[in-house]
Amino acid sequence: MTTLPRPRATSSFLLGLADDALVTAQRLGWWVSRAPELEEDVALANIGLDQLGQARGLLTVVADLEGAGRTEDDLAYLRDPEEFRNVVLVERPQADFAVCVVRMLLLAAWQHEVYAALAAREGPARGVAGKAVKEVAYHLDHGRHWVLRLGDGTDLSHDRAQSALDAEWPHLPELLAADPAAPVDPAGLHEAVLGHVVPVLTAATLVVPELGAPPADGGGRAGRHTAHLAELLAEMQQVARAHPGASW
């Protein structure tokens, strides 16, 4: 199997990180005015803004590496769904609060390890990663708090948390799929990510499912998405596409 040249591999990897953050920010925006309590409404909005900032920083780096004259806005608003490289985990709706916090725990555990690795080495994303790892540490703690609260709470909250875990867990392997040509090989983060996640799930009295294999077709990293991404992007991109080149 031929590995990609490093500049291309780096750009592709960072684009995936950026798209994960951008789509997550859009999904978290849905919770504004819908969270179970006012403080959580503000917390989710702030976490979404952190993710948006990470996406902007990474997209700027990708645009520079690409050298094609595109901007972060072009990459965010003028690509079609099949050009996005986010994992399927983040694009699916999360109208259940338990799904929201379980997904946050899984994603933040992975992002924390990726950003920590990027921040520790020379590379174009080092500055973005150094800031992001501090933000994601809070996201991880926030997800941990809520998963414990729901899983070890009432019978109803426990059942909702278990259902959320059963729905989200099958998408975790895509985050951990091997990519030896990337600046950080996600396969090498397997133990560290599970080390963040499994003790929380166990303490929350949740049954941890078996971890399956990454999608054989490459999943979202290969541009193979669910219909949910197209719906999300249609809403997110509509103003930019209706008024190309406009500025405010």
Image (cartoon, rainbow, N blue to C red):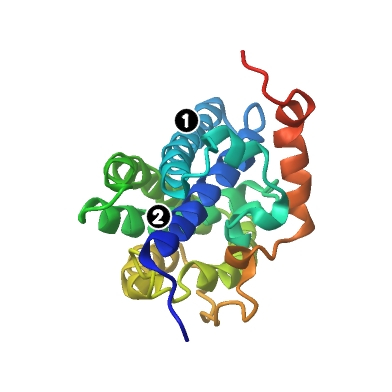
Q: CA distance from mark 1 to mark 2?
A: 17 Å
Decide if residue 22 is on the left or right side of residue 134: right
Instruction: Give the residue type at disc 2.
Output: Gln
Which quadrant of the figure contains the C terminus? top right
Which one is nearer the viewer's eye here, 116 or 108? 116
Q: Is residue 235 left or right of residue 24?
A: right
Tell me the residue that label 2 is attached to: 111
Q: Is residue 192 visible?
A: yes
First in sequence, mark 1 or 2: give its number.
Answer: 1
Residue appearing at x 61%, y 67% in the figure: 222
> Could you tell me the amino acid type at mark 1?
Asn
* Residue furthest out toward the bottom: 1
State which mark lies toward you, 1 or 2: 2
Q: Mark 1–mark 2 contact, CB under 8 Å?
A: no
At x 74%, y 60%, the residue is 226
**Residue 67 percent location from the top left of the image:** 46, 45
User: In which image quadrant can residue 41 be found?
Assistant: top right
Residue assigned mark 1: 46
Mark 2: few/some/many CA within 10 Å (<14, 14-19, 20+):
many
Q: Tell me residue 43's x, y (percent).
A: 48, 32
Residue at x 54%, y 77% (from the top left corner) = 209
Tag 1, which secondary structure?
helix
Q: Position of residue 207 (x, y in %)?
A: 52, 74
